[in-house]
Image: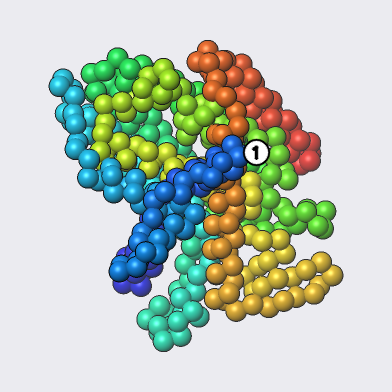
Amino acid sequence: MNAPDFAISLVYIAYALAVLLTFGAILTWVERKQAAIMSDRIGANRAYVRIPFTQVKLIWLGLFHGMADGLKLLLKEDFKPLAYDKLAYALGPWLAIVPVLLVFAVVPFGGTLDPGRLFPSLAEWFGGRTYPMQIAPIDAGILIVFAFSGITIIGAMLAGWSSANKFSLLGALRAGSQLISYELVMGLTVLGIVLIFGTVNLGTIVERQSGTVLGFLPAWGIVYQPFAAVLFLIAGIAENKRIPFDLPEAESELISGYFTEYSAMKQGVFMLSEFIEIAVIGALFVTLFFGGYNLPWMNDTGFVFPGGHAVPLSHGWVVVLQLLTFLGKVFLLCSFQILVRWTLPRFRWDQLLRFAWKFLLPLAIANLVVTAVALWVQQA
């Protein structure tokens, strides 16, 4: 890898980490405030920062509560169980958060970047190279997503087993069976998109959602596969282990489930990984079903509206609009997931597994069969 390519990779990695960590922090506030609005109460508004030498308190709608939580977890004592497996106990939090971050590496968060056009003074250094706005533009992108997401199952099970706690072990068993069940459903729903777009490359899938259908509908995956989109989102929420699928934690039954014996920042890592996973699930849904960074009638040169009317834009504006479009769509999906979390009651354990194997799985298979038959008839 030459110097320009290495520099762009570093910028992409820094951007991805900043986005995911910011989402992880902001979503803690969104959950508090959204839950408060739905419950007709004020919500988090006690943490504040006082301007020095004044009595002015900056509350900012409760934004400082997330910072206070992070500071509290950093400063708390790290208690450990009396009898536990030290290596597995230490690996648990890392296997929970690192694969979630790695999944984002194959998600395209923008179109094509031409650094020479953005920064003319560096045009000679970049030599006319262009870069897809994606950390790892791998052909087998969807396969990488499921490979990394499967590792999080190991993290939850290791954390519960290594803690030498019956509540943690029960949470680990629940996590393993739940995540495996719903990941199978997710895989089958994604196969319909793979059949339609003919690729497992996430970048190519987004590019093929840039046109229109019937002249006015955006050619997004949800237009071609609306049923699969619903199934994917349900399975994605279940993969995140949040209400109504929070049986691996289930505070009223298992204290904190598989991470009951974790404290201080180790517990914080588990909690942060769940909020980051909300953003990652939103990013995957946007990539597969919501057109990714695409806006209707927008391409790399600007907007081309029906009837031939064009609005040209500079390369810099196109890049900024694509980045903001992707982030805006992801934020809407994250807010919707939190809305579901504060709307539905928790499943019973037998209901959760029955819902996966006897309801969602047959529907996912039926959707895949119908999609395959429809494509076969169309090509015949």
Q: Where residue 175 appears, x then y in whole percent? A: 41, 24
**Left or right relative to 109: residue 261:** left
Residue 157 in view here: no
**Left or right relative to 367: residue 56:** left
Q: Where residue 332 appears, x then y in whole percent? A: 60, 49
Residue furthest to the front in view is 55
Rendered residue at 32%/41% (across/down): 269
Is 113 or 334 nearer to us in this picture?
Answer: 334
Rendered residue at 71%/39% (across/down): 226
Colour pattern of the rendering: rainbow
User: Hey, what amino acid is under mark 1?
Assistant: Ala
Image: 317 above or below 100: below
Residue furthest to the bottom in view is 121
- The 10 Å Cα crowd at callout 1, few under 14, some 14 to 19, many 20 or more, is many
- Which element carries disc 1, helix, strand or loop? helix
Q: Which residue is mark 1?
A: 229
Residue 215 in view here: yes
Image: 224 above or below 8: above
Rendered residue at 84%/70% (across/down): 307
Rendered residue at 32%/28% (across/down): 259
Q: Where residue 235 appears, x then y in whole percent? A: 56, 31
Q: Where residue 68 appears, x then y in whole percent? A: 34, 49
In this rendering, the count of numbered labels is 1
Image: 79 above or below 112: above
Quadrant in which the N terminus is drawn: bottom left
Q: Toward which corner of the image does residue 295 lie, by quadrant? A: bottom right
Quadrant in which the C terminus is drawn: top right
**Left or right relative to 142: residue 321:** right
Is 323 or 252 nearer to us in this picture?
Answer: 252
